[in-house]
Image: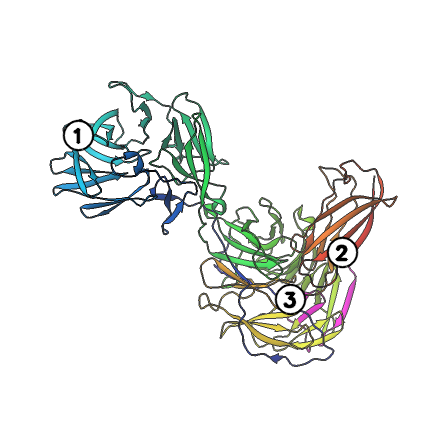
Amino acid sequence: MIRPRRLVLAAVGGVVALSCTLLTAPAQAAPGADEPAGTVRLATEKRVTVDYPWAGASGFQYRPGTTSVTTVDYPDAVPPAHAGPDDLATGTDVVNTRDGQKVLQKHRSTGVTATVTIPTGQAYRAAVGWSVLTMDGNGALHVLRTVDGTLTVDTPVTGFPAGARPVLYRTGGSVTRLAIVYALDGKTSVGLVDLSDGAFRTYVTGDEATPQLAFNDRWLVADWKAIRVDAEPGTAPTALTRTGAQLEAVVGDQLLIGNPGFVPGGTEAALTARSLVTGASATVLPSSFGGIGPTPDGGALATAGPSSLDWNIHRITPTGTGGLSTTEVARVPAAATGVQGLAVAGGELFLYGATPGASLRYSSFQLDATGRPDGPQTRRSPGLSPSTCLTGDAACPQLEALGDGRVSHLWTGETGQESVVTVGLDTTTVLSAPTDGDSSGRIGAGTGRYVLYNGGSGKQRVVDFPRATTAGETTLTRDRTAAAVWGQTLWAPGGTQGQVTGRNLKTGTTTTITTGAPCTPTDIQAVNTWLYWSCGSSAGVYDRATQRKITVPADLGPARLADGFLLRENRTTHELLLTDFHTGTATTRTLVKLPATDQNTGGSNGRWAVDRFGGPIAYLNGTYGEVSIVPSGVPTSPLAQMEAQAHTPSVIGKAFPWSPVWQLNKPSTWTLTLTNASGKIVRTLTGSSTGAAVRPAWDGTTDSGGGTTGGAYTWKLTAHPRDGQGPDLTLSGTMTLG
């Protein structure tokens, strides 16, 4: 059974560095909230349906869902030389506004206006272009238009069958005709009013009470029957092959069909066109639905796009050769969705939220060195079922960004067994590792390939996900204690009070250090050369590079270590506090006061989170779906290698390239050179790290595209810190190709 999950919204980023030989009391700085470097909004991938309150020759209006109306101008619209009610063709750009018994008309591109006054005893029914359709008390229809913009001229509609009851009035791709669906003698029929002289003609009679219909100045299609508007009286319409789709519009000689009632699994709805002359069909816009309609100038508007993140309105117009032309004319903003979890690592902000179909998904935003968003929202996982949450766990779902482009969380299967899950390097792969029946656990820490799992059984496991290509496996099981994983080292309490022992997860070798803690720590965290310990009432940080020790505050809730600083939330004032200790003296300041919404919930990875890989802090800012990002202001550590998987391949080729992984401690840009035994560089690869991990791929070809021979090769990796702080990192090694 999947346990319930609590909705949360937040993220934090930070950096920790220590440099002090003596334990010193932390200084308390005056509070001063930082301004965010940027704000992002998590958008749902569900594409919204739009409607068009008005469309004309110079532009259109659209409304996504229940939001406000947006007006779009066509950049190439050319106003007519003359516009007015005496020229019906210019009505393609008229906006009609009804005010009681008056209809106010304005030609949008020329500014020409007119006012149609509806006579006493007549009621408004419809309007298009310069014409207004009304009905009097006897059921007779009238076409109203003005002379000189003020004098209303009333033209009775002729030819409408006696005793017929209008069911529907419909505008289409014309300003000279208007469709009326009517019922008579148990049958439903469709006809067009010629607005120039009021003549009505019935074209199609069928059995549907409200038949689908679409028309322009050439064609009327109703009840899946098509007929030319200028066909001789008595001409029977041509029956069309029915589909489960909707008749949307007629553009030129093409019938647009879309919004199907059923789409087979694995396919996308599309807008198609069927020639009313030849019967040939073609796709006009793939992934199109939910906002398609005719325009009075004989064209159409339609939405299309792969997701709401790229959901656009297209203008469809006829070509001179009988085809169709499509032009993207507007981008529909995506709707916000709630942030149900967040994490940040290696300059990437991961947000966990709802997707279409009631599933959940990770999305991410790239951040630059200052913490500002640098690019659009990107999908980072397939749809996922809800993650594991413990009863009363406010900071849930708990996410751990691993710094290599992946993020990890816990999931419980139907049998109650918990698994550690990782996603992030593509949009389809979910890798998991079972915990041998354990449950009610927590992710204690994680970097790169290793994730620390603290089981409810009292056991602690280190799960290994090598190179993100295979399912994870437990590489170490031990009794549960305070512990941390950084790179390939597991840090846990030593055998003597104040000691912490690091175990290399690859070699098994150990290193013991004395932190100065007056207890066996109940919390241990590691970032770069920094080790954080807490005994509950006291806490400190130890710098392994300089053997410096420094006291940090321990008077609040759980802290989160980063590169040179510590982050905590004051649960009384709801201030997010940053303790900077990189100089050797701890100084605490208020980073931001968290919003009043969702207080006393969350914590690290609840409503705030911190980038341990030299990046910023992120937090829920109180607006639905929004997260703000704040830089720490603390200098980062020099670029360093945390772990590497630079294996020697048995074979190499385009289908099976050499794909090493160097896990670094912060993002970088990199260059990798491959040199043969003669000292000649045969291949140079460049790129930018995925998170803080360098992930090149060499297929064995040279820079000129040729193949390489077997033998010894030397590789050299040069990584440049993306934040510009500290020197480049150079690594090298050898391998032998068969």
What is the x, y in percent for residue 411?
56, 53
User: Hey, which quadrant is residue 204 in on the image?
Assistant: top left
How far apart in space, not on screen, are marks 3 and 2 (Cα)? 26 Å
Circle count: 3
Report crowding for label 1: few under 14, some 14 to 19, many 20 or more residues within 10 A (C-alpha).
some
Q: Which residues are magenta?
A: 507-532
CB atoms of marks 1 and 2 within 8 Å: no
What is the x, y in percent for residue 4?
48, 56
Pointer 1 or 2: first along the chain: 1
Quadrant of the image for the C terminus?
top right
Could you tell me the amino acid type at mark 3?
A: Val
Q: Where residue 15 is drawn, which disc sits there?
A: 3
Whether residue 553 is visible to the viewer of this picture, yes or no, is no
What is the x, y in percent for residue 558?
58, 70
43 or 322, which is in the foreground? 322
User: Hey, which quadrant is residue 315 in on the image?
Assistant: top left
Q: Secondary structure at mark 1?
A: loop
Q: Secondary structure at mark 3?
A: loop
What is the x, y in percent for residue 2?
51, 53
680 or 588, which is in the foreground? 680
Pointer 3 or 2: first along the chain: 3
Left or right of 474: which side holds 386? left
Q: Where residue 164 is drawn, which disc sits there?
A: 1
Q: Where residue 506 is drawn, which disc sits there?
A: 2
How far apart in space, not on screen, are marks 1 and 2 (Cα)? 87 Å
Residue 526, magenta (yes or no): yes
Could you tell me the amino acid type at mark 2?
A: Lys
